[in-house]
Image: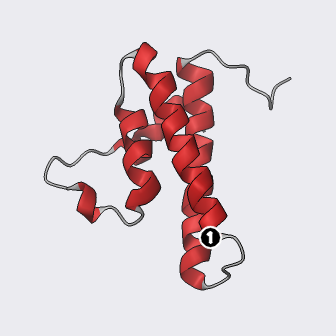
Amino acid sequence: MAIESLHIFTEYNPEQSMDDLRYPEWQSPFREALLEIDREKLQSKMMKAEEAIFQRLQQLAGNSDSEAEAERQATGDAISALKILKTEKLNYPDWKST
């Protein structure tokens, strides 16, 4: 997945409120990170998003219903997107290629 593929995560609808997010606990900070253009602020917002995702995954631990599984999949996709942002925007090493 290249940075161009992140468009699926950044489709911004100004009429969509945070209340419309399926998993607002972590999707709100995740979305803020994806939409950040200031490199200085991006690092901080990415850390907040990762923390929110981690906390939510801890809450979901041991829950095996289909909704929890769907949310775990969504968090996995978000983590993948954040890794791409780190590599492409913050010049982190691409661990897959080393």
User: Of 97 and 86, which appears nearest the observer?
Assistant: 86
User: Of 80 and 63, which appears nearest the observer?
Assistant: 63
Residue at horizontal 62%, vertical 70%?
60
* Residue 12: image location, x then y, percent: 26, 44
In the picture as drawn, the residue positioned furthest to the right comes out as 98
Residue at horizontal 63%, vertical 61%?
57
* Residue 30: image location, x then y, percent: 44, 44
Residue at horizontal 59%, vertical 26%?
86
Would residue 77 be visible to someone looking at this image? no
The residue that disc 1 covers is 60
Residue at horizontal 62%, vertical 74%?
69
Horizontal placement of 70 versus 24: left or right?
Answer: right
User: Of 97 and 68, which appears nearest the observer?
Assistant: 68
Tell me the quarter of the image containing the C terminus.
top right
Q: Tell me which corner region of the image, top left, top right, bottom left or bottom right, holds residue 38.
A: top left
In the picture as drawn, the residue positioned furthest to the bottom comes out as 65
